[in-house]
Image (spheres, rainbow, N blue to C red):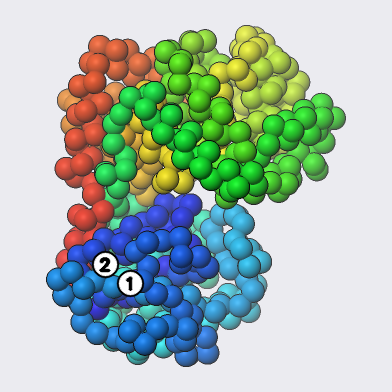
Amino acid sequence: MRILLWHGWLLEGSGSNVYAAKVAEVLRAAGHYVVLMCQDRHPERFEFVDSAGTVEDGVVSGLDPSDRPRDATGSTGRLVLVRPEVGPILPVFVIDEYEGFEVKRFVDLSDGELATYLARNVKALRAVARWHRPEIVITGHAVPGAAVARRALGPGRYVAKIHGSDLEYAVRLQGRYAALAAEGLRDASAVVGPTHDVLARTVELVPEAGGRTLIVPPGVDVDRFRPGSREEGLRTAAELLEAVAEETARGRRGDADEALVAALGARDEANLGPLAGRYDQAVPDAGAAAELRALIGYRGPLVGYLGKLIPQKGVHLLLQALALAGEDIRAVIIGFGGGREWLHALVSALDQGDTAAARWIGERSGMAIELTDPQIRAARGLAGRVTFTGRLDHRFAPSVLAAMDVLVVPSILEEAFGMVAAEGASAGALPLVARHSGLAEVAAALEGAVGRPGVFSFEPGPGSPARIADGLQRLLELANEGGKAVRTDVSAFVRRQWTWEQTANRLLEAAR
């Protein structure tokens, strides 16, 4: 079957990027001929990409002659990546670095910039569809993907896929995006999303989507995310990191801490946050391998976080919870983002028991500091219990998750699903997630699998650090009582219910 996937960004990093990559990979493996439209400039990094080209001014170019449109059956699956030339500006929902682009949030685009971006994507999709002759088209995000497909292909010719960031960072905030979403969703053959919650929010914001919604959960690469021992996981991750030393050399180095302490001491807001721009956030820290090796012999509780380091993800709540929890608990913070240096600053302030510094960070960073002054003073020594690794992609992250007892997902923002919680569970790390939006549905499913309502979630809102601390103690006690059994149960549930093969099949069913 000839399938066309439209995704506006890269194939690594965010949940929607991983979603696009994994669905494309699985469809190719199933024997389909897939064309994936995205902005990734490094197709050579993905083994499932057979060929790559570009589309500009309505012309598809740069492809091998063997990539001519054809049917694919059996084991003859093929995947061609086509990158549309969209100009110098790449709109995003949350600011990140994108090679070769000026990055602007959708809400910050002028009407002219938005119109140009949409027009170029419409022209590109129309050209690729004419060349590929797809039987199924699946587009990502309520905006811009659905509207691009509607303008390029016409009504009823595409499935629209909701991710959540499109709703909260664009559609809910500006009327022009609500109108754009309505234009695309009203004529989609189906509107799919990962949970009841995100689809209900979609219909609330875009009533035109009603009557055509279907739940299609994302998947987990269960062959990568699997349980293992702490020693094995940390050693494997460290060895893999040491093998790419040239790559990690671009990451955050230890001397960044000196600049951080100086900026914090001087209350230099203008220079503290931008410290994250002095190193490559797309790669692991230079010292990540050594930091992980240092944890191999640790026999106490190990918890962690994996995701974006921005205030909306609530990492600061976890750090405050660690100040309230047992002093034997250590944490690994995996991720990247514009708020990273503020999180380092918070750890530094708590490590010194510096109430004034902690309060200043709360005022300037957008992170709520809920600890009392006595609790801040009692947090002295916290830095020795917190390890930052920088970004770890799917080469490294699964092994580190397998080494954890608990993975915390403290997101403040409404989430469509919470893929990282499922990945952690698959690796045997017991999840502790904020009980709201799509995260609540993920937690309820995992709690049902072990017959313990509420065990994997905490009530969000004011007071979250204390409830996270209580949740950590609860899950660590559960892990001690149940041994490997409870880890095995949650992992087995994910392997039964949330695989990329199931996701891809459900998408195809929605399109038929």
| SS of the residue under disc 2 | helix
Foreground: 336 or 239? 239
Does the image show residue 59? yes
At label 2, which amino acid type do we have?
Answer: Arg
Q: Residue 28 carries which label?
A: 2
Locate residue 392 relative to residue 311 in the image: left or right.
Answer: left
In this view, 85 is above or below 329:
below
Q: Is residue 411 visible?
A: no
Q: What element carries label 1?
A: strand
Quadrant containing the N terminus is bottom left
Q: How dense is the environment of label 2, judged by Cα within 10 Å: few (below 14), some, or many (20 and up)?
A: many
Q: Distance between the residues labelled 1 and 2?
A: 6 Å
- In front here: 211 or 358? 358
Residue at 14% of width from left, 71% of height from top?
Answer: 74
Disc number for residue 125: none
Mark sitting earlier along the chain (1/2): 2
Q: Do the residues labelled 1 and 2 touch (CB within 8 Å)?
A: yes
Q: Which residue lies at the image location 49% right of the left edge and 11% below the top edge?
A: 328
**Three-letter amino acid code of the residue under disc 1:** Leu
Quadrant assignment for the C terminus: bottom left
Residue 392 in the image, given as x and y percentages of width and height: 49, 42
Measured from the top left, where is residue 67 in percent x and y? 34, 83
Residue name at image x 47 percent, y 90 percent:
59
Q: Is residue 254 left or right of residue 35?
A: right
Residue 79 marker: 1
